Each structure stands twice: as C-alpha cells, then as structure tokens.
Image (cartoon, coloured by chain):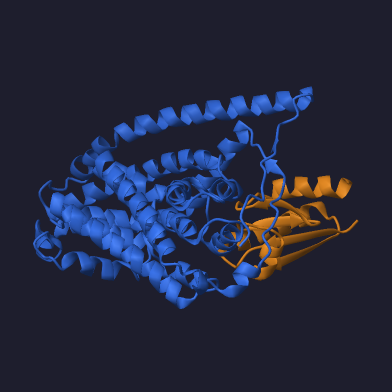
Amino acid sequence: MKLDIKVFGSGCANCKRLYGEAEKAVAQLSIPATLTKVEDIKEIMANKILATPALVINGEVKSAGRIPNAAEIAAWLVTVDAK
Amino acid sequence: MKSGFCCEIKPVSPKKTDPELFSSLSWNTVFKTFFAFVGLLAWWEIYHNLERFADWFTFSLFHLSRTAHLGSAVQFFVFEGPKVLMLLVLVVFGVGIVRSFFTPERTRSVLAGKPESIGNVLAALLGVVTPFCSCSAVPLFIGFVTTGVPLGVTFSFLIAAPMINEVALVLLLGMFGWRIAAIYAGTGLLIAMIAGWTIGRLQMESYVEPWVYETTPGECSSKEQSLVWAQRIRFGVEAVGDIVGKVWPYVIAGIAVGAGIHGYVPENFMAHIMGKSAWWSVPLAVLIGVPMYSNAAGIIPVVQALLGKGAALGTVLAFMMSVIGLSLPEMIILRRVLRLQLIAAFVGVVTVGILLVGYLFNLIM
C-alpha cells in the first residue's frame, strides 16, 4: 500500500526541517510514498492539529509540535507499511 | 461556541510484558542517565573556574591592563561568553525535560471550560511550560477558542509563552542573580494574567475572524504518548541542539556589544537618558522595544551593560519585556485569525502593563 505522508506547517523554519527529515526517511527506505507539505491553515485545523509542525502518515497524526528525526520517521513508516 | 472537553488523556504505557524491549529500554535509560550525570559534573567544574580562566587569559596571557578599556572589555567577553553559553545549555536541557511532560493538547483540556480568573492564572503558568513554537500560534489559537477556552484566557497563554522565555530567565539568573530573574518572571506572569483578563472583559470576540469559530472543534489524536525517561532526555538534548544551536551567534554578538559598553562607555553615561529621574525613559524604552524583536539571548548582555552604566532597573526591564514579549512576526502571523482592532487591543493592553511595571520598579528600587 502506498504511504501518504503529509507535513503540516505554516512555512516557518521548523516546518521545513520536518519536511527535510521526512524526505530523508523516505529516501532511506525506498518505500513508495507521496510526501506533501500542507500550509493552508484551514486544512491544518481540519486535521485536528494543535501544534505545528506536524506529521501525518496515512491519516494518522504521528507527531505534533516537535521535529522527529529521520530515523524515528522511518520507524513509523515501516510500522504503518507493515499493517 | 461549544464548551466542554474534547480530549481524554489515554496514556499508553510501554509494554512491560515484552522482556527484550524492556531490558533494552532500561539499558538505554541507565546509559543516558549516567552520561547526563557525568556531563553535569564536568559542567560544574568548568563553570566554577571560568572567572579565573578569564582573568588569566586577559591579564596574564595577553598582559592587558586591568584598568584599561580593552582589558576590561576582553575580560568581560572571555568570562561572560562561555558562562552564558554554559548556563544556556544546562537550563535549556532542564526545561526541555520539563516540557516533555506537557503538550498543547493537555493544556487545552485543562483550560477548557474553566472560569475566567482561574483560567487566566493557569493559562499564564501553562504558557511558560508548554512547548510552543511561534508558528503554532494560529492553530493553537483556533484550537483553544473553538473548544471552550475563553478568548482572554487564550491571550494569557499567548502572552506568557514568548515573554517568560527560559533563555531569558537563565541569562538573567546567571548575570544578575535570582532576585532579578524572579522579578522578571513574576511580573511577566502578572502581565500575562491581567492583560488576558482585561482583553476578556473587553468582549472582543466579534473581532476574531469569523471563519475561526466556524471551524469544527477537532477530536484530538487519541493517542497520547507516555514518554519513557530515555525519550525525555533525548527531548532535552534535542532542545539544546535546536535552541542553543540557533541562538549562540546572537549570544556572542550580544556579549560582544555588552563587552564594548562595559569597557568603553563611561560609568553613569546611561543615567542621563535611562536613569530614574528621566520620567520619559520608560515610555521611550517601550517605544523602542515594541517594534524590535530579538531573541532573549541576544538582548540580555546589552541589558547587563546598560544596567552597569546607570540605567534604571524599571526602564531596562520594560525595554526587555517589550523586545521579547511583543514581536512583529507574531503579530503578522496572528493577523490571519484576528482583526486589526483586536491585535491593537492586544498590543495596547500588554504595552500598558509593561509601562506600569517599568514605572513601578523605578519607583521602588
């Protein structure tokens, strides 16, 4: 199943960093995945996110308000992929 | 506006039934705790000897004169530079660990539905310890007001969070002692509570952008992670990397400026324009400070130098609070959810609070 990864943030430096970490994780694992950045505030709220930057994988909020490193993201990707 | 909680905290405990996982977590924890302990000891040793090192460096190694401008400035820089950076590392680490116990979701559920005065007090206190990136201001604001946290209470949170900045407190503590740090924290909290309460009284809900209230309040992600100790330590270490990594050039620059002022500006130079007797010094300081935005680390060495040259405490406090507490970038971000009148009210009420604090301290000190 193709993974859908979304990085939510309004464009500040932290959000860009999270996107970078997510890119690294995807590159490391070479699992098919789409990675998108969502900056629109209404969409952020629609996903019930309170603190940015936030990472959502296949619709599930994995982290909000902090920046997990590529290794942590990769671990989540593997777990979600295995489901 | 719907009131009531949306979140229940369901802690997820680490699986204790998996022996391998558990023992590897234990090892990790032991290792990290040991490392942290050794780090602390080393830190303490170095910290204690900093002044002697600075003296030796300036006066013995480079043979600079104690009384000359350059000698004075260099000693200040070599002493204060590493001292401030070390303090920063220690406290950012400690605060990082404290912050790992708080999340915006939990803060929201604590605040939702509480009556206003208590809410303002809690919100200000929570604003200090909840991890908060200023770009989260908008989602956080919307999330709070749509789940029953009153507008004034939300503002108390938003005022306290940037102003009572652990970086600022540490630096104040290290450079001026705990009394001044406590005064800053105490008055900052008071301003957050009272300004927030005042904004609540003004009944300005209609000046929030209407689409905010139309946002359906979310159910929070029901997964609340209960972090293990090793993760908390990592959170602290990451905080150090993030914050100190971002801030150290400003600290060095600020200390260099402070060193320059310390060494070269004559005593009491500031007393004339920033001293007690000049009644207009407080409003002037605030006027200069509000549009400025610096992170706390950079401005404090300047503050120290100003104080050392005769500026009055109240004026300097007011200056510092206006620089750190109100920032143009944050106002621009908040413009997405607040109409101009409400932003003006926000800035106005906080400014008045800062002015009052400034005058108060000039009077009593």
Q: Position of residue A54 (x, y in %)?
A: 66, 57
Residue at left 62%, top 37%? B231
Residue B209 visible in image: yes
Q: Residue furthest right?
A: A1
Q: Position of residue B320 (x, y in %)?
A: 30, 58
Report which quarter residue A52 is drawn in: bottom right
In this view, A12 is above or below B19: below
Q: Position of residue B97 (x, y in %)?
A: 52, 38
Residue B79 visible in image: no
Q: Taking B244 as reference, is B10 left or right?
A: right
Question: Color used for chain B?
Answer: blue
In this view, B114 is above or below B20: below
Report which quarter residue B353 is drawn in: bottom left
Front one among B226 and B147:
B147
In this view, B337 is above or below B271: below
Front one among A54 and B63:
A54
Residue at left 56%, top 51%? B113
Residue at left 41%, top 30%? B42
How many numbered callouts? 0
Residue at left 45%, top 54%? B161
Q: Taking B148 as reference, is B309 left or right?
A: left
Q: Which residue lies furthest to the bottom in this view?
A: B340
Front one among B50 and B184:
B184
On the rendered image, what quadrant is the N terminus of chain B found in?
bottom right
Q: Position of residue B72 (x, y in %)?
A: 17, 50
Report which quarter residue B284 is drawn in: bottom left
Front one among B138 and B20:
B138
Instruction: Specify the chain shown as orange.
Output: A
